[in-house]
């Protein structure tokens, strides 16, 4: 056989191909060996994860007793004796959404989201080993969307918290929960961003979320987010989705926030937050130019509220807050987040940019409106079996100033038109039947004048946004 140039070229190509394949195989083996072992992490921590389901009792309704319907039946059945007396229907039990949680102590304390258990009459906890317990609420904190529960059990497996401040964008993280009721499912991803401010369930912006690309879905709420050391560094809370399913953008509550909230709930059942007393805005490029800053950063003080801790500490309008108690303020949303991590009475150091110079101030924090546990007012509508299905309470003056709204807050929600229209506890009622509401007394007057049947509009504020809903009233 003659050895030609083609044979030489083909031989070199074959050798090159073989070498490349060997190199890629080596790279793939190295890449595979460098990936984290999630199996060990799941096996170690899954026993500490719980599935949470809720039950709400729906008040019984009377069957019959509607005068118009009864009169129609008599006309259709002349001469017949009809039993048209109202019949009391049995109480109904309505199953709520399934969520997740995790044990934080060996004697049965459990962390989860506030929105998973808020308004529940019964809370059922399913452990990983299939034991089932009824949980009691130790405390709820709506601004952070966290709740602390307790079951009567001992010698339980539990997780440890890590330091969420040490997280870096790109770090591996793992979530375990019950998406769509599929109990104890694991999903991994990376930290996509830190310090995210997204629409929450509160009028107050006391949260700075961890953003991940972990596949979080309905039912994962309240479950833990682990780092590779098996420590909880976040609690899964929200997703950003147009379909209700995972789009690769999920938000978790930092563990350092959860530790603070858990400690206070366990001690007192409530959470106290400090108050600075300013209205803020973002420092954009234009403001940075006006005030001769090197780059846009900080929180711009639009207004110092009267008789506030900020006013007493020397903060002025048009100051730019750059640092709060050792925490850098890059965006204006950072300021309320850090202020909310300290209790009232804390003396905090503030660095502000004023007239081209840095000023060091000391402020003693006041008490945030979220610290006020408003007692439910007595029923404010005339006797007709409370047709609206909810009770309201007064808004404090601080709440009116900080949130910038007038109205009354829904303090208790029962079965009725309010629940059916989509109202939730904590909503602020601004108008009812197109009439302004600025006090419980005004609400009572308007509610008492509502028609017996038909639709009436109610305007509310929720998450800092207004919306109008329709209440359907029946006799």
Image (spheres, rainbow, N blue to C red):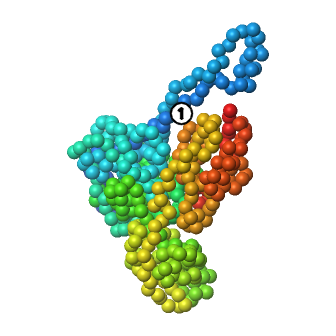
* Quarter of the figure that contains the C terminus: top right
Mark 1 Cα shell of 10 Å, populated few (<14), some (14-19), many (≥20)? some
Q: Is residue 453 left or right of residue 255?
A: right
Image spot of residue 192 (x, y percent): 45, 63
| Camera-side residue of 82 and 146 | 82
Which residue appears at 68% of the width and 13% of the height?
A: 82
Which residue appears at 62% of the width and 56% of the height?
A: 439
Image spot of residue 166 (x, y percent): 34, 68
Please determine whether, in this image, residue 410 is positioned above or below residue 472: below
Image spot of residue 343 (x, y percent): 40, 67
Image spot of residue 386 (x, y percent): 60, 39
Which residue appears at 47% of the width and 87% of the height?
A: 359
Q: Residue furthest top?
A: 79
Assign a secondary structure to mark 1: loop
Per the image, the residue denoted by label 1 is 59
Residue 137 appears in the figure: yes
Which residue appears at 51% of the width and 29% of the height?
A: 91
The mark total stands at: 1
User: Which quadrant would residue 293 be assigned to in this image?
Assistant: bottom right
Q: Residue furthest bottom?
A: 356
* Quarter of the figure that contains the N terminus: bottom left
| Camera-side residue of 88 and 177 | 88
User: Which quadrant would residue 284 be assigned to in this image?
Assistant: bottom right
| Camera-side residue of 79 and 116 | 79
Q: Residue furthest left?
A: 155
Residue 181 appears in the figure: no
């Amino acid at each position: 056989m003659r050895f030609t140039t083609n044979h030489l070229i083909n031989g070199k190509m074959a050798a090159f191909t073989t070498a490349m394949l060997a190199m890629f195989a080596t790279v793939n083996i190295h890449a595979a060996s460098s990936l984290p072992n999630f199996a060990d992490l799941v096996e170690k921590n899954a026993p500490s994860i719980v599935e949470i389901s809720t039950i709400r009792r729906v008040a019984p309704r009377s069957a019959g007793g509607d005068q118009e319907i009864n009169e129609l039946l008599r006309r259709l059945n002349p001469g017949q004796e009809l039993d048209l007396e109202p019949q009391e229907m049995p109480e109904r039990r309505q199953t709520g959404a399934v969520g997740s949680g995790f044990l934080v102590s060996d004697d049965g304390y459990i962390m989860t989201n506030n929105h998973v258990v808020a308004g529940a009459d019964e809370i059922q906890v399913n452990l990983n080993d299939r034991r089932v317990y009824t949980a009691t609420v130790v405390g709820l904190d709506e601004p952070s969307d966290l709740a602390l529960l307790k079951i009567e059990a001992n010698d339980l497996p539990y997780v440890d918290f890590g330091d969420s401040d040490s997280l870096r964008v790109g770090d591996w993280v793992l979530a375990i929960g019950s998406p769509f009721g599929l109990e104890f499912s694991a999903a991994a991803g990376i930290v996509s961003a830190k310090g995210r401010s997204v629409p929450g369930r509160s009028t107050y912006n006391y949260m700075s979320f961890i953003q991940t690309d972990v596949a979080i879905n309905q039912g994962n709420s309240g479950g833990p987010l682990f780092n590779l050391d098996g420590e909880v560094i976040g609690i899964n809370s929200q997703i950003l989705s147009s379909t209700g399913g995972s789009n690769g953008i999920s938000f978790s509550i930092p563990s350092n926030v959860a530790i603070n909230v858990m400690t206070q709930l366990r001690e007192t059942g409530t959470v106290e937050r400090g108050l600075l007393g300013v209205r803020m805005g973002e420092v954009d490029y234009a403001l940075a130019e006006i005030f001769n800053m090197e780059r846009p950063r900080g929180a711009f003080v639009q207004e110092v509220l009267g008789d506030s801790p900020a006013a007493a500490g020397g903060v002025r309008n048009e100051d730019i807050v750059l640092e709060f108690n050792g925490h850098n303020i890059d965006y204006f949303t950072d300021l309320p987040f850090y202020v909310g991590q300290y209790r009232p009475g804390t003396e905090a150091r503030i660095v502000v940019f004023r007239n081209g110079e840095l000023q060091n101030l000391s402020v003693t924090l006041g008490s945030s409106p979220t610290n006020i546990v408003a007692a439910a007012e007595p029923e404010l509508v005339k006797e007709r079996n409370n047709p609206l299905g909810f009770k309201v309470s007064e808004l404090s003056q601080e709440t009116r100033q900080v949130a910038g709204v007038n109205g009354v807050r829904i303090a208790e929600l029962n079965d009725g038109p309010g629940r059916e229209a989509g109202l939730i506890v904590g909503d602020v009622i601004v108008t009812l039947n197109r009439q302004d509401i600025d006090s419980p007394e005004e609400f009572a007057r308007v509610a008492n004048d509502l028609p017996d049947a038909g639709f009436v509009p109610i305007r509310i504020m929720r998450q800092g946004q207004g919306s109008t809903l329709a209440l359907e009233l029946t006799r």
